[in-house]
Amino acid sequence: MEKRVLVVDDHPAMLGLIADALGRTGYTVITAENGRDGLTAAAEKKPDLVILDLSMPLMTGLQVLRALRSKLETELLPVIVLTGKETHADALDSWMGGADRFLTKPCSIAELIETIEDILAAPIHH
């Protein structure tokens, strides 16, 4: 069965790039352009993994991450934070919020896919 990956990023070009690469790799890709839509998509589409930007309108990535971790249905959903913010505080906030991995943009597609595969291959997520 194809794994479903939800990509939440407010930059359409980034969404397109990641969605295209993951689609060619065999993943079913769901996209959302803001945090609120990402949270709704996570609840409705039941992805196997989320790729989440931090800086977004309506809800920040950290707010989305905390909301995912607060719900029984999504508390163990693997989340990769992929962001242009690369301060120590951003990474620490992401880890403390429950992120499984923290990657900074620009990130190679190969590194992103390898990270996804590593997480999804683990017997227990999070």
Image (spheres, rainbow, N blue to C red):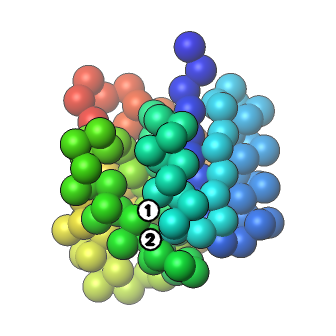
In the drawing, does residue 105 fall left or right of residue 79? right
Cα gap from disc 1 to disc 2, whole angstroms? 8 Å
Whether 120 is drawn above or below 99: the answer is: above
Identify the image quadrant of the C terminus. Answer: top left
Residue at 22 percent across and 42 percent down: it is: 72
Q: Whole-percent x and y of residue 121?
A: 38, 26
Image quadrant of residue 101?
bottom left
In-front residue for pair 57/91 = 57
What amino acid is at disc 2?
Gly
Q: Residue 112: in sight, yes or no?
A: no
Disc nearest the viewer among 1 and 2:
2
Q: Earlier in the sequence, mark 1 or mark 2?
A: 2
Q: Whole-percent x and y of residue 82?
A: 51, 64
In the drawing, does residue 56 fall left or right of residue 13? left
Q: Which mark is residue 61?
A: 2
What amino acid is at disc 1?
Val
Whether 51 is drawn above or below 117: the answer is: below
Which residue lies under the disc numbered 1?
81
What secondary structure is found at the residue carrying circle 1? Answer: strand
Kindly indicate whether the residue at mark 2 contacts the one at mark 1 (C-beta within 8 angstroms): yes
What secondary structure is found at the residue carrying circle 2? Answer: helix
Residue at 29 percent across and 39 percent down: it is: 73
Residue at 31 percent across and 69 percent down: it is: 94
In the drawing, does residue 80 fall left or right of residue 19? left
In the drawing, does residue 3 fall left or right of residue 77? right
Whether 21 is drawn above or below 15: the answer is: above
Q: Which class describes the residues within 10 Å of circle 1: few (<14), some (14-19), or many (20+)?
A: many
Q: Which mark is residue 17?
A: none
Q: Which class describes the residues within 10 Å of circle 2: few (<14), some (14-19), or many (20+)?
A: many
Q: Whole-percent x and y of residue 19?
A: 72, 47
In-front residue for pair 31/22 = 31
